[in-house]
Amino acid sequence: MQCSKCNSGELRRIKRTGLWQKFILPLLDYYPWECPQCRVVQIVKHRAEHHSDGHPHSASNKNKS
């Protein structure tokens, strides 16, 4: 997945905010993603992009201690 503004390939999933993202988008299976370089938020149909090895692109940095 690439940023539509700066073409960076490093989008990351962000928490849902507001009524639209919390209640409407989940019904349609859309997820908010943010570009860490230009901070543009994009709403995308996919939760995570997978590499050819099957691991999610957004591999959890959350799990690192």
Image (cartoon, rainbow, N blue to C red):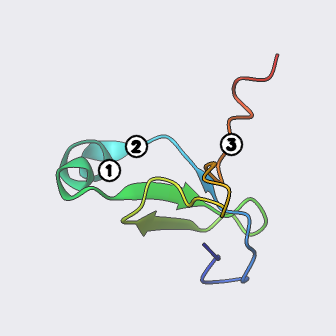
Above or below, comparing residue 7 to residue 13 in the picture: below
In this orientation, which residue lies closer to the viewer: 2 or 19? 2
Q: Residue at x 52, y 54 (%)?
A: 48
Say what amino acid the circle numbered 3 marks: Ala
Q: Nearer the viewer, mark 1 or mark 3?
A: 3
Please give the label number shown on residue 63.
none
The residue carrying mark 3 is 59
Q: Tell me the CA gap for discs 1 and 3.
A: 22 Å
Find residue 29 and report its horizontal and vertical position in percent: 27, 55
Q: Residues within 10 Å of mark 1 (few under 14, many from 20)?
A: some
Q: Residues within 10 Å of mark 2 (few under 14, many from 20)?
A: few
Left or right of 13 in this view: 2: right
Find residue 38 and report its horizontal and vertical position in percent: 73, 69
Q: Residue at x 73, y 64 (%)?
A: 10
Residue placed furthest toward the top: 65
Please give the label number shown on residue 21.
1
Say what amino acid the circle numbered 2 marks: Thr
Q: Quadrant of residue 11?
A: bottom right
Find residue 23 and report its horizontal and vertical position in percent: 20, 44
Left or right of 32 in this view: 64: right
C-beta proximity under 8 Å, tags 2 and 3: no
Q: Which secondary structure, mark 3? A: loop
